[in-house]
Image (tube, rainbow, N blue to C red):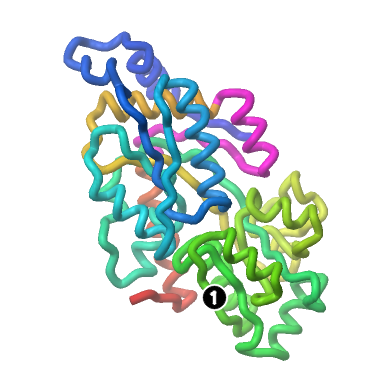
Amino acid sequence: MAFTVNKVALTLGYVCATGLVAPRDAPAQAFPSKPVRIIVGFAPGGTTDICGRVMAQRFTEQVGQAVLVENRPGAGGNIGAEFVAKAAPDGYTLMLTSIANQAIGPSLYTKLPFDAVKDFTPITQVISIPNVFVVHPSLPAKTVKEFIALAKKRPGVISFASAGTGTSVHLSGEMFKVMAGVDLVHVPYKGSAPAMQDLIGGHTQLVFDNLPFVLPFIKSGKVRPLAVTTTQRNPQLPDVPTMIEAGVPGYEVNSWFGLVAPANLPQPLLERWYAESVKALAHPDTRQRFGELGATIIGQSPAEFGAFIRTEIAKWAKIVKASGARVD
């Protein structure tokens, strides 16, 4: 499992975290003096929520204050993102963000109540994971090619659920529609948990969702995996082909999750939270937990994460345009 950090930034973060800072940075030394909240823009149970709780638990142990996850689901994560964008940059409000809010949303939505770049302070990218194409067991398709053939016989009939409009799992489905030449009906929910509940109940037929969330349902036989969206197979699902192997050339989606704060977070607090993030991601329990979920730990520096977000916005603008997806 990969783990990359910027050594210079890590050293600087460590110095701040241990209190070895100049007197002008004194306010950061007493931080935090009250509970901290990590906003998650999706319902409990999904990958964003899982990732947020893993980090919150580790932060709580490290900083000596309660670090709590606060779910504010809706609008593809935009309700939570807007809340954080308008919050005070005092280090007490963070967000476990995702590719949906920081990369896809700017191109998908005609109007957003926040700027994905200007209104946030990047701290670090936490993990990267594949999405998995899963179907209800009753669907008579054991492979992607069989599913495509079935979908072409039933245009506009088969529906796919998602954690919300504008999420990577939504766009994974939209990309598949375009590249496979099939007509599927998108049904958005306020998170992965309610979307999966309806899939298991037979109200929808398929979903593209993050591996950590769908893995237990695959293992229990409640859903059938047809492909992963990355270019390499995942160790947690070694027998499940990639979408390219399954017959959709050029198909690739990597979902990622990161930590951000409101814009204009003071530099000492940014350095402190980055140092705490690096420490949390290096902990054996964190590495084991994310490894079990099939995730790759990243740990980019704030500057690297900011540059990555800008690159992702440009990348997904092309994908959104090609898919024809748009939300007014």
Image point (64%, 55%), residue name: 230
User: In the picture provided, is 104 more to the left or to the right than 26?
Assistant: right
| Numbered range of the magenta stretch | 282-305
Q: How many marks?
A: 1
Q: Quadrant of the N terminus?
A: top right
**Residue in the foreground of this view, choosing between 312 and 115:** 115
Q: Secondary structure at mark 1?
A: strand
On screen, 60 above or below 241? above
State the image coordinates of residue 2 (x, y, percent, origin top left): 61, 34
**Residue in the foreground of this view, choosing between 72 and 261:** 72
Q: Is residue 151 visible?
A: yes
State the image coordinates of residue 115 (x, y, percent, origin top left): 27, 56
Question: Which residue bears the numbered disc 1?
Answer: 187
Image point (72%, 48%), residue name: 234
Which amino acid does the dot numbered 1 rest on?
Val
Assess whether residue 290 is covered by the magenta stretch: yes
Q: Quadrant of the C terminus?
A: bottom left
**Residue in the foreground of this view, choosing between 147 and 314:** 147
On screen, 127 above or below 322? above
On screen, 249 above or below 43? below
The quarter of the picture where residue 127 lies is top right
